[in-house]
Amino acid sequence: MASKETKTKKPVKKVTKKRSSYFKGVWAELKKVNWPNRKELLTYSYVVVGAILASALLIYLADTVIAAILRVLI
């Protein structure tokens, strides 16, 4: 049998090129991002904290009502 010698390309260069291309794309997308200014960031933060507090209050009230109902039934 005759053995065939096949030349294999180094996959390291291919992987490195793919990574380089990926990070270049990421950097290009980050340049397109419209980052909020300080005032907008504070406003968004207040909205998030307010929503969390409202959700916590709603869950607390529901838990209290359900616990009271279960105490009466048991």
Image (cartoon, rainbow, N blue to C red):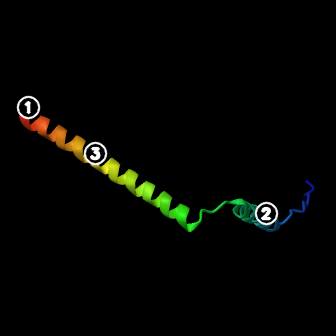
Q: Which residue is at the front of the view, 1 or 65?
A: 65
- Residue 22 appears at what percent x and percent y? 74, 61
Q: Which residue is at the front of the view, 59 or 74?
A: 59
Q: Which mark is residue 59?
A: 3
**In this view, 40 is above or below 65:** below
Q: Which mark is residue 73?
A: 1
Q: Which residue is at the front of the view, 43 or 68?
A: 43
- For image coordinates 24% across by 41% down, the residue present is 62
- Residue 34 appears at what percent x and percent y? 66, 60
Residue 37 falls in image quadrant: bottom right
Name the amino acid type tagged 3.
Ile
Badges 1 and 3: C-beta atoms under 8 Å apart?
no
* Quadrant of the rendering where the C terminus is positioned: top left
Name the amino acid type tagged 1.
Leu
Q: Which residue is mark 2?
A: 21
> Mark 1 vs mark 3: which is more N-terminal?
3
Q: Secondary structure at mark 2?
A: helix
- The answer for how far apart the CA atoms under marks 2 and 1 are is 65 Å
- Residue 2 appears at what percent x and percent y? 93, 56
> Mark 2 vs mark 1: which is more N-terminal?
2
Is residue 22 toward the left or the right of residue 57 in the image?
Answer: right
Badges 3 and 2: C-beta atoms under 8 Å apart?
no
- For image coordinates 44% across by 54% down, the residue present is 47
- The answer for how far apart the CA atoms under marks 3 and 2 are is 47 Å
> Mark 3 vs mark 2: which is more N-terminal?
2
Residue 31 falls in image quadrant: bottom right
- The answer for how far apart the CA atoms under marks 1 and 3 are is 21 Å
